[in-house]
Image (tube, rainbow, N blue to C red):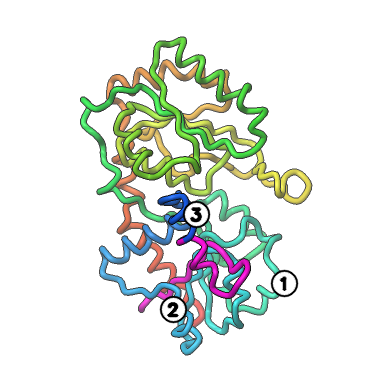
Amino acid sequence: MVLNLFFEERDDRWLPGDRHLRPLLRRLLLGKSFISGQRRVLLNLCAGLDRLGIRYRVNDYRYIRKHPEELACIIGRPFVLDWFKWKNPLLLGVAMYDHPIDAPETLEDLDVRQVLLPCAWYADMFRPHWPHVGAWPVGIETDLWVPAPAAQKKIDVLLYDKVRWDYDRYQPELIEPIRKFLEASGRTVETIRYGQYKEEDYKAALARCRSMIFLCEHESQGIACQQALSSGVPVFAWDRGGPWQDPKYFPDKVRYEGNVSSVPYFDARCGMTFTDAGSFAAGWGRFWSQVDAGGFAPRDYVLDHLTLEKGALHYYEIAEAAMQRHA
């Protein structure tokens, strides 16, 4: 089975085909761009498939229209479904709809075999709305994100700021209290803000830092956090719990409270979690003593669950099952 993969990060805006030109112009003007989580999914899936020797095509629309009996795996962005009338069986996800209420009624006319979400809690949110929903995390490049020698670890803490919503609230309520607590404790801190760095900068920061504090309201997978774990950096993560609070949906359109997490792939080897500034202060000493003693083994978790090969093989098995289910 040759996988037919489709990923588009953007739709045409002004002219047919300008979605291909706009990134090139942006790179010429601004330099190398930030790699989005959605694009990282495609890149890592393809890298894993290459290692396993599994063949695939990417965005071969001419081929898929000539072969309506073959499975089309649409990884990113639902506007791809509007470009022509799809007659193929479809595997959708993981970067399609944020919630089923966004899906058009025309989706019911398509042969959707499986919808993939990046983690279990996100899949559980979709499951009451659609049949055949599953969880699939993409693998991490464990040969790229590797532990740095201890001699390079000059900074105690990397503060990874991915607070997306209500920033004016969380800046004084969470971020600054954490920063001041660390400074008062004598810890050295480096800060990195989501969407404002290049991957090589993040990789270099992880090599300098002994631990990471991860601040994000919730994550469907958390690739950046897992890159830190693969790099052997223990994580103290803000995992506030409560409902899914994406302001596009909450509280008026969607209320979902099922195990929402900022670290859906995480265990005791990876580090610890806290819920607010108070529980951060209460738990910091135990976390840091473990870091100091080398008591965490975050890379082992990634090697056990999230390698490129494991992710790619799992995806291939899901695609095969989607076709067999129909047969």
- Residue 150: x percent and y percent? 22, 27
- Closer to the chain start, of discs 3 and 2, is 2
- Residue 241: x percent and y percent? 60, 35
- Closer to the chain start, of discs 3 and 1, is 1
Q: Residue at x 41, y 26 (%)?
A: 190
Residue named by callout 1: 105
150 lies above or below 66:
above
Between the C-alphas of marks 2 and 1, the distance is 26 Å
Q: Secondary structure at mark 3?
A: loop
- In the image, the segment drawn in magenta is 1-24
Q: Residue at x 30, y 19 (%)?
A: 292
Report the amino acid beneath label 3. Pro
Q: How crowded is the residue under tag 1: few (<14 C-alpha within 10 Å), some, or many (20+)? A: few
Between the C-alphas of marks 3 and 1, the distance is 23 Å
Report the amino acid beneath label 2. Asp
- Residue 139: x percent and y percent? 37, 54
Residue named by callout 3: 118
Between the C-alphas of marks 3 and 2, the distance is 24 Å
Residue situated furthest front in the rendering: 29
175 lies above or below 52:
above
Report the amino acid beneath label 1. Glu
- Closer to the chain start, of discs 2 and 1, is 2
